[in-house]
Amino acid sequence: MAYDENNIFAKMLRGEIPVKKIYEDEYALAFPDINPQAPVHVLVIPKFKARNFPEFVQNATNEQIAGFMKAVATVAAQLGLQEDGYRILSNIGKNGGQEVPHLHIHLFAGKVLGPMLCKK
Ligand code: AMP
């Protein structure tokens, strides 16, 4: 399936809708999740057009991949999360529960986050 240029994160990257920027560099943009699931819930997205992590890894250059992954760590460090820790997660496709079809890394922190997966 093709990348959907009209997904909401693509619009944010193009500056078509406002973004409360937490971090930005040439590879990535980070902003708060609109529906936070933890005291700290930030999304980090690559500027590269990819629907998900495997497409990003397959199609981006090593420099773009490294730049993006470093940006995720930089955001966590700048938010002061290294000592107490945090969780990063990326949903992929239907079984992953992905809603927005532009790769994003969720960064959760601010409390003990509990089990990795819901046990329901
Ligand atoms: P996922 O289910 O992994 O695709 O997660 C998509 C995330 O994007 C959800 O946690 C939403 O709350 C979040 N989200 C959707 N629209 C916005 C927006 N305009 N600004 C910030 N976060 C958003």
Image: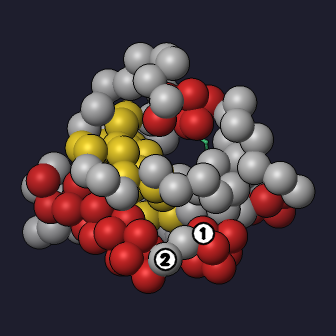
Measuring from the top left, give residue 73's x and y in whole percent.
Answer: 26, 67
Residue shown at 75% from the left, 49% from the top: 3
Ligand 1's quadrant is top right
Instruction: Please state which of residues 94 and 48 is positioned toward the viewer in this rendering.
Output: 48
Q: Which residue is mark 1?
A: 56
**Depth check: 74 or 60 in front?**
60
Closer to us: 114 or 1: 1
Tag 2–tag 1 contact (CB < 8 Å): no
* Residues packed near mark 2 inside 10 Å, few (<14), some (14 to 19) or many (20 plus): few
**The residue tagged with tag 2: helix, strand or loop?**
loop
Q: Is residue 67 left or right of residue 59?
A: left
Quarter placement of the C terminus: bottom right
Q: In this rendering, which labeled residue sits more in front, label 2 or label 1?
A: 2
Residue 53: quarter of image: bottom right
Residue at the (64%, 58%) spot, across then down: 50
- Image vertical order of residue 59 relative to residue 6, above or below: below
Q: Position of residue 115 (x, y in %)?
A: 51, 68
Residue at horizontal 49%, vertical 17%?
Answer: 17
- The tally of labels here is 2
The residue pinned by badge 2 equals: 61
Color theme of the render: secondary structure
Q: Earlier in the sequence, mark 2 or mark 1?
A: 1
The label on residue 80 is none
Three-letter code for the amino acid on which mark 2 is drawn: Thr
Identify which residue is drawn at 60% across, 69% down.
56
Q: Is residue 71 above or below residue 37?
A: below
